[in-house]
Image (cartoon, helix red, strand yellow):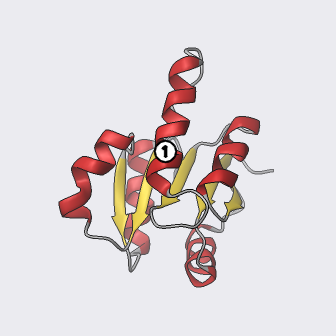
Amino acid sequence: MARYRILIVEDNEINQKVLFAYLSNKDITLTLAKNGKEALQLSRENQYDCILMDIAMPVMDGIEATRSIRKKESIKKSRIRTPIIAVTASDPINNRFIFKDAGFDDYVPKPICPLNLKKKITQYSKIRF
């Protein structure tokens, strides 16, 4: 039985497959949301150990979704703060203040380096690979 839960929020099928391939592990349950709106709903219904959030998505982007998740966490003061890591093709250096302001803990640039991804997840969550 899996000990950890990761929510992957990504609209691109290739990126979904890459993330699932990098993170598939008997100790981890991976859940997919294809946009920020789905991510909000899933985060209301479930507790995740980490959320990997794409930035540019249809329906609701990752910045708006992260702001909404953080707002709900602040209202529910007893809830644990879920680590949210941006997974982005946009220039993370120039956008790091926007990401921080939205409530992201960190970011991983695309194309994704699996070692960097796992390092960031381990840094901000209790998940160990």
Report the residue at 58% width, 78% height from top.
12
Q: Residue 109 lies in what quarter of the image?
A: bottom left
Seen from the viewer's position, the closer of residues 5 and 57 is 57
Decide if residue 111 is on the left or right side of residue 6: left
Q: Which residue is mark 1?
A: 66
Q: Is residue 93 above or below residue 124?
A: below
Report the residue at 81% width, 50% height from top.
1
Q: Residue 23 at what x, y percent from top left?
A: 59, 67
Q: Is residue 104 above or below residue 32?
A: above
Q: Residue 55 lies in what quarter of the image?
A: bottom left
Seen from the viewer's position, the closer of residues 63 and 81 is 63
The extreme bottom residue here reads: 14
The extreme front residue here reads: 59
Q: Is residue 115 above or below residue 83?
A: below
Q: How many marks?
A: 1
Q: Amino acid at mark 1?
A: Thr
Mark 1 Cα-neighbour bin, 10 Å: few <14, some 14–19, many ≥20: many
Report the residue at 56% width, 18% height from top.
75
Decide if residue 56 is on the left or right side of residue 10: left
Can residue 99 be seen in the rendering of this structure?
yes
Seen from the viewer's position, the closer of residues 113 and 1 is 113
Seen from the viewer's position, the closer of residues 17 and 95 is 95
Q: Residue 13 at what x, y percent from top left?
A: 63, 81
